Image (tube, rainbow, N blue to C red):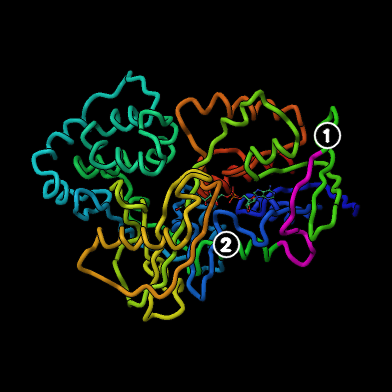
Amino acid sequence: MEKIDTEFLILGAGLSGLFAANLLSRHKKDFIVLEKESFPGGLARTINYKGYKFDVGGHRLNFSSSQNLHFTKDILEGRLLRVKKCSKVFTSGKLVNYPPELIDCFKFFGKTGFKIFLELMRNKNNVHVDSLEEWVETNFGQTLYKLYFKDYTKKVWGIAGNMISKKLAQRRIGSTNLVKMLKNIFVQTGDSIENQQYFYYPEKGMGSIIDKLVENISGVDRVHFATSIKDIQSNNNGTTSLTFIKNEKLYKANFKVLISSIPLIDLLKALDCKQNGFERKVLYRSLILVNLLVDEVRLSDEHWRYIPDPDIIFSRMHEPKNWSKCMVPNGDKTSLCLEIFCDYKDKVWDSDKEILFKKVKSGLRQINPQNGFKITDFCIERIRYAYPFYYLGYEIFVDTIKNNLNMFNNLVLIGRTGTHSYFDIEECFDNVKVAMANLLF
Ligand SMILES: Cc1cc2nc3c(=O)[nH]c(=O)nc-3n(C[C@H](O)[C@H](O)[C@H](O)COP(=O)(O)OP(=O)(O)OC[C@H]3O[C@@H](n4cnc5c(N)ncnc54)[C@H](O)[C@@H]3O)c2cc1C
């Protein structure tokens, strides 16, 4: 068995693990990173298929802090685009803007527009809510919930909105300021239009941030890819060492601090830390991406199209070229990314790739029957741990596990997957900065 001694051992070379490594590198600390896959980036990687680039579902960047914006601009050497948003929902056979513009509301909703307005204005003080459905209905009203959220939520999560925690709505909808955005449509609150109308996007895809984070820590062989963690050893003072396999060879890494950005359930398994069955309650929603190469110059002007219709297999689609022209190898061609939500090892997850391709083509015909286009090739990616699942009551299990893990006083959980939190990229940056500040200063 080969031995490695290091001060910090980071698990996972996704955005959070690599960002933590960058902060350690800046402070001239000794560290190594272990990654399960043969590539870095996790959910923030960009897949390159025959010169066509696809994110793991289109990623857009919104910054609430200028420090994060400047960091991202600097690391990308200025190659960060500011893009005007265009999203649509295909609902009741119509394609409508999302969020709706005033004119669409009255064109599409007719008299219902007035009802929506009254519901939005209703006093919400002292209303107790638990579920996503209650949260959305309280903030937006029942009519908007039915029109915009009900079917889509069920399709994305596989269960109805009254079975999902309000925390998901607070994170997904609250953090995008959609409440203010929708109010703005109806009552012109004058809220900042920056986050509502624009987003940032790396010219060469989200993975170019990952490439730069890796580049910044290279030179020394610090990231070990294609590793398989065997177990983590501990004593009364915390975790002490970890054994892993790489290229069929067994390694033992001794460390002072263990930083984990890998799924909680993988970490518990490696620690052999049973949690009275609570670990089985840490759930994830999985995702299949069907990426199409298309022999057309352009298919749409949208960044996102949402498809709540339960008869269509995919729930979201986007055309990467509309985010950056660098996402296709030449200007005469385009591509599409279709997102299918499912559970790990369910019927959809286990579907053969040709069947998925056929169902995607059929869904595309339903959305746009008269507009055939030539698909020249496709590739499929299956993402097991795409979303931490915030079902109603999940907190009791996740919080208990995290509290129990506090007994390892040199174990630090970071990032979206590591903390089982619905973080976007900026929140990962912020979370890692706080965690590392506690370790470094
Ligand atoms: C479909 C989709 C769309 C998104 N859109 C946006 C967006 O528009 N804007 C935005 O800001 N954010 C978006 N996000 C969120 C963003 O991708 C994440 O917040 C961020 O990438 C999480 O990074 P992470 O490093 O915390 O987790 P991960 O990316 O999950 O990294 C974990 C890493 O650990 C590795 N790993 C797993 N198990 C092991 C193991 N046993 N041993 C070693 N390594 C292991 C994984 O391979 C991975 O590299 C989106 C996410 C998804 C899924």
Judge from the rendering whether residue 370 lies leftward or rightward of residue 437; answer left or right: left
Disc tally is 2
Q: Quadrant of residue 163?
A: top left
Q: Which residue is mark 2?
A: 209
Res 216 → quadrant = bottom right
What's the residue type where badge 1 is placed? Answer: Ser
Image quadrant for the C terminus?
Answer: top right
The residue shown at (56%, 30%) is 281
Picture layout, residue 22 above or below residue 332: above
Is residue 343 depicted above or below 167 in this figure? below
State yes or no: residue 191 in magenta: no
Q: Name the residue at 52% across, 61% down.
A: 206
Q: Earlier in the sequence, mark 1 or mark 2?
A: 2
> How far across and how far down the image is residue 154, in percent?
35, 39
Spatial distance from mark 1 to mark 2, Cα to Cα?
A: 34 Å
Relative to 13, 393 lies left or right? left
Residue 405: quarter of image = top right
Is ligand 1 closer than 8 angstroms to the Cβ of mark 2?
Answer: no
Name the residue at the left extreme. 111
Type of the residue with mark 2: Ile
Badge 1 element: strand
How far across and down, in percent of the image, does residue 330 sit? 43, 81
Q: Which residue is mark 1?
A: 234
